[in-house]
Amino acid sequence: MPSPDQIAIRGRLSAERSLADLTWLRVGGPADWLFQPADADDLAQFLAALDADIPVFPMGVGSNLIVRDGGLRGVVIRLGRGFNTIEVDGTTVTVGAAALDAHVAKRAAEAGVDLTFLRTIPGAMGGALRMNAGCYGSYIADHFVSATAVTRAGAQVTLSATDLNFAYRQTDLADGWVITDVTLQGETGVPDELNARMQSQLEKRDATQPTKERTAGSTFRNPAGFSSTGRADDVHDLKAWKVIDDAGMRGARVGGAQMSEKHSNFLINKGGATAADLEELGEEVIKRVFQSAGLTLEWEIMRIGEFAPSEGQAERGAEYRTKSGSKA
């Protein structure tokens, strides 16, 4: 089989490409290869020719991702301009996988289609589909019509809701498959009212979340198994932020990593953090919450790649500092 750089492509292939600048947390080592296909046909031809033993990881805008400091073995696929189209036909919205969730919500609202729940979700539509993203009581699954993907073997296929088997913060999308476009259905609405609703959502988000920090969005899935509804009667007992607070981990730090003091389910890079700092702090939060509440938090942020050779969580001997500054 040819090596990746021997495959005829129309897109761009880079060797030993650092991924740190492609993630919101700004951490992580290099990928063996980063491929940015020109279009779906280019992607399909590349994957069909690529050695089946080489791992493939589709990467969006890096909003929900920790790339470990040792980097990633295999090929990272990053979709660009050829995959960010947004088309509205009646109440049906078809978008490229690289289209930003916020842009989709705004374009749909302009056309009188209600996909406002997407407005405050970070990232692009490929990742939103894969993770069944949602907030304010709505999820991708509630609006899903179909999607197109390129399989690891290079076949272009159409996916149904049955194929994806949507669940809270997950789908059954196979490893190495790359979503290229998504079709959603929304309710009709008045553009001015939809825009006003989104503005209210943005104001609420900015008041409660560390939107000006280097973060990857929600760190852990809610133990309750559903997202915040945004309503006054929302129940918080089994929200991730609440059990993290109860475990005393709001503001806790490891190196340059911190659980945000503004919203304790946000893991942030305060400056100079490594991927190991971030992941180790997250694992400590999981341990403390289990000790406090008997609940095992599950990561919502994806963690990929290899630890740096000098790392090893048992060897790092990091100190955990709580908000009060005490060591643990």
Image (spheres, rainbow, N blue to C red):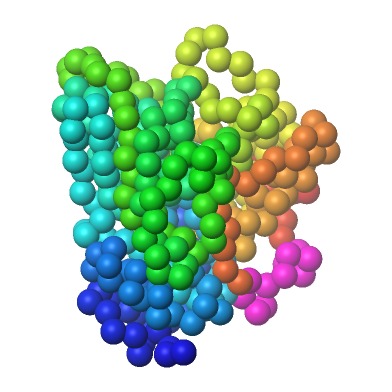
Image spot of residue 250 (x, y percent): 63, 36
Q: Is residue 202 left or right of 257 when viewed as pictured?
A: left
Q: Nearer the viewer, residue 80 or 222?
A: 80
Residue 27 falls within the magenta-colored stretch: no
Which of the two residues, 314 or 112, is positioned nearer the viewer here?
A: 112
Q: Residue at x 52, y 40 (%)?
A: 162
**What range is drawn magenta here?**
307-317
Who's the residue at 26% across and 32% down the image? 92
Q: Residue at x 77, y 45 (%)?
A: 287
Picture coordinates of residue 77 (x, y %)? 39, 67
Q: Position of residue 57 (x, y in %)?
A: 48, 65
Answer left or right for 177 relative to 190: right
Q: Is residue 310 magenta?
A: yes
Secondary structure that dominates the magenta span: loop
**183 left or right of 26 in image:** left
Compared to 272, does 158 lie above or below? above
Instruction: Name the residue located 34 percent from the left edge and 69 percent from the top edge.
Output: 44
Measuring from the top left, give residue 30's x and y in whole percent.
47, 75
Q: Quadrant of residue 241?
A: top right
